[in-house]
Image (cartoon, helix red, strand yellow):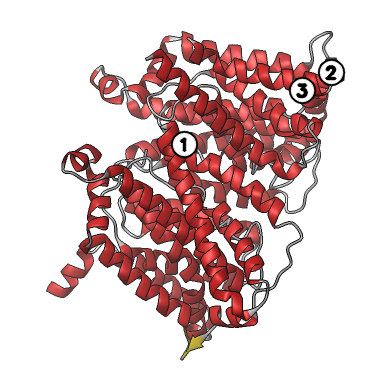
Amino acid sequence: MLRSLLPALSLALVVIAIAWLNPRAISYFGFTLMLNLAIPIALATIAQMFVIAGNELDLSIGTFVGFVGCVTATWLKDAPLLGVIILVGAIGVYALLGALIHLRNLPSIVVTLGMSFVWQGLAILVLPKPGGKAPDWLLSLMAFKPPYIPFPIIAALVIAAVVHFGLMRTSYGVILRGSGGNPAALRRAGWSLLRTKITLFALTGLFGVLSGMALIGITTSADANIGNGYTLLAIAGVILGGGEFVGGRVSPIGAVLGALTLALAASPLLTFMHIPPDWQVAANGAILIIVLAARVLISRRER
Amino acid sequence: MTLLRTLTAKPWIWSFLGALLVWLATIAFTGGYGGGGMVTAALSLAVFTVIVGVGQMFVITLGPGNVDLSLPANIGLASAVAMKVMGGSDSMIVVGLLAAIACGAAIGAVNYLLIWALRIPPIIATLSASFIIQSIDISYGRGLQIKPPPGFASFTNWQILGIPVLAILTVLFTIGAAIALQRMIYGRSVLAIGQNIRAAWLAGVNVGRIRFLTYTLSGALGGIDGALLAGYFRGANVDIGNEYLLASIAVVVIGGTSVAGGKANVPGVWGAALFLVLLLTMLNTFGVSAGVRLLLTGLIIVGVITVAGGEKALR
């Protein structure tokens, strides 16, 4: 029980620390600013969560987000139809990868590591120099200022709710998670593991596309390397959110909370603590280790 | 005929064939010009991939889920440590190398400590460790513009009859690694753990100690690689190890080591490393842009894995 509260507790701790260091940050504008990049990070984390639910790992999601960003800032603005076709095609590539990994029984780490070069190469070809511009509708969507509650928080709630419903409450969601939990049992029950793997990878692609678009909506222009850090952030977010590496045990709500924790801890908290930005990456690693250590302590006590 | 059959049965032969094919394609393009120099250059560069590749191979052989993702950060930090300790003076070369190895071995030991104490998959342990190492490196190596000692720089570039001395030493090292793997208790234990960790434990293999040694070994090899890279490229750099994450895993898999663990192949690491380096040389010779080069590298790696793979998944 305590264990399932851990993601929320870690987020609360980080928010309390920020409130204590700088009370003025706890306001509508404070959160809007601090959680600026939380939406793309949360979407990338959800993307990673789908492959992890199927006992795989995607080491290319970061460069994929970068590629989507480059397409968003160029073709999606100048030739929307072509842009949409390319992005849908990219999701199709993800689905094909899922099929390939399943049919040839390949290690997803190596395949996606190779794919990370493919996406980066494509991103450079699409946008050789940093630049481009986000489509206007995307800019105005990401700059949306709802009353009372900052947009990133509403977006996080919506993402968590939608994915939670789809993966945890629908019957096919159970099958998808089961394909990571007990593939042999599912196969004997007559479900196609090929189809579940394709679905999981396509969902990863879909949320990767959403993440890249959201990122460009915030940064307004793109760069081929813009998403590189997201691969590791996304894995860390899933694990922080209570996800396990094997057995299809993931939590969409936890993953979004994990992403918010990382988004807040990585830069605003460190800035308020006057820690130089050099240590941002280390903060992510340290949080990961502390939360995992807490998890070990809790499961020992509950046993 | 029998010889041919024995050869094609070896899993490592394909990586060497691939390397040969790429080399021939490049010479065909240049009209035979620069073929020898290309081999020399490929040998000098492949050395760095082979050293970390062997470490990664031992780790991957431990079984599903075992992989060292901290190598790039490790290489970066060790390169900075080596250059700082050497301080540009020839008399400190050995001390600097030892410092780099110690730094790498410590990272490997911490990796295993995290795996053991937190009971987390090695991927997450080495990943979180690499976050922290990266920051230490950025902070420690900031503005570090120390050149390697002249003796060390020329040692890493030293050639005899067009063969880099470093490559000869690395061949000797890989022969040692092959003996350790196939003929020594340590290597047999690694293979046994990879085949069936429980059976190995029941058979009296000290599983914890062997895994600890393997992660420490991988770390130490990353450390020495960082020092050598800094010597070869005339200085330390935070990003110096970045390409070795993909490279170290790719050479292990392309070289015929099973990603499911329990089956390793040392010569294949050499073949695959030469293949990757020559592939880059070929794409550079063809004059393709950076984007196309990355794209083709990725596609070829996925293609080779698809053809060579087909065993149980890594995780």
**Badge 2 and badge 1 both on one subunit:** yes
Which of these two is toward me, A225 or B79? B79
CA gap, disc 3 and disc 2? 7 Å
Q: Amino acid at mark 3?
A: Ile
User: Which one is in front in this view, the residue at disc 2 or the one at disc 1?
Assistant: 2
User: Which one is in front in this view, the residue at disc 1 or the one at disc 3?
Assistant: 3
Dot 1 lies on which element?
Answer: loop
Q: Earlier in the sequence, mark 1 or mark 3?
A: 3
* Quadrant hosting residue A216: top right
Q: Is residue B138 above or below residue A57?
A: below
**Badge 3 and badge 2 both on one subunit:** yes
Residue A218: percent from left, percent from top: 78, 31
Q: Earlier in the sequence, mark 2 or mark 1?
A: 2
- Tag shown at residue A57: 1
Q: Amino acid at mark 2?
A: Pro
| Residue for point 37% across, 47% down | B212
Q: Which chain letter matches label 1?
A: A
Q: Is residue B24 above or below residue B256?
A: below
- Tag shown at residue A23: 2
- Tag shown at residue A18: 3
Kindly indicate whether the residue at mark 2 contacts the one at mark 3 (C-beta within 8 angstroms): no
Q: Is residue A76 left or right of residue B244?
A: right
Which of these two is toward me, B290 or A59? A59
**Badge 1 and badge 3 both on one subunit:** yes
Q: Is residue B264 above or below residue B165?
A: above
Dot 2 lies on which element?
Answer: helix
The answer, for residue B6, to whether it is visible in the render is yes
